[in-house]
């Protein structure tokens, strides 16, 4: 199983980006999808979570600006980021808790990170 994050880049304050996380491999169920970020000199923090039941949770700092969603047919989930601020600059990591085919274990996987830089 692999998680491939993409979509980062350089954007001006107030701009938008959409991050994607493609989950590949022999997957039975993706139970939880999340985006985390780590800014320079800071700890990794949760940005947004989406469960297989459709529940979402967002960090207070991104509520109303970021939206997490998924395309089940493509095993891909997204983070739409609007009204970006300087403080959103970070490496963004996707994360998934899932079940592999033929296994009862709930496993935790991380993507490689994609860099978002908000700068004028």
Image (spheres, helix red, strand yellow):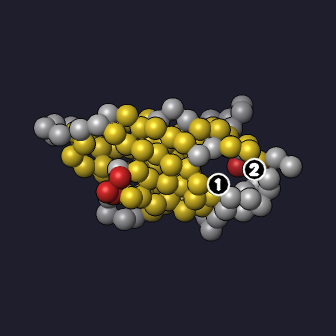
Residue underneath mark 1: 17
- In the rendering, at what x and y percent does residue 107 appear? 30, 37
In the displayed orientation, state which residue is furthest to the left.
102
Position of 18 with respect to 87 (left or right) is left
Residue at mark 1 to residue at mark 2: CA–CA distance: 8 Å
- In the rendering, at what x and y percent does residue 74 appear? 35, 52
Which secondary structure lies at badge 2? strand
For image coordinates 51% across by 40% down, the residue present is 5
Question: Can residue 45 be seen at all in this image of the molecule?
Answer: no
The residue nearer to you, when weighing 111 against 106, is 111
- In the rendering, at what x and y percent does residue 64 appear? 62, 68
Which secondary structure lies at badge 1? strand
* Disc 1 and disc 2 in contact, CB within 8 angstroms: yes
For image coordinates 59% across by 38% down, the residue present is 114
Residue underneath mark 2: 11
> Residue 42 bears which disc, if any?
none
For image coordinates 33% across by 57% down, the residue present is 72
State which tag comes first along the sequence, 1 or 2.
Answer: 2
């Amino acid at each position: 199983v692999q998680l491939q994050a993409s979509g980062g880049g350089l954007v001006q304050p107030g701009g938008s980006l959409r991050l994607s996380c493609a989950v590949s491999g022999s997957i039975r169920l993706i139970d939880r999808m999340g985006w985390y970020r780590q800014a320079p000199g800071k700890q990794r923090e949760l940005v947004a979570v989406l469960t297989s039941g459709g529940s979402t949770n967002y960090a207070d700092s991104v509520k109303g600006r970021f939206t997490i969603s998924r395309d089940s047919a493509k095993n891909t989930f997204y983070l739409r980021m609007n009204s970006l601020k300087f403080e959103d600059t970070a490496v963004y990591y996707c994360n998934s808790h899932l079940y592999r085919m033929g296994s009862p274990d709930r496993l935790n996987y991380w993507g490689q990170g994609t860099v978002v830089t908000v700068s004028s």
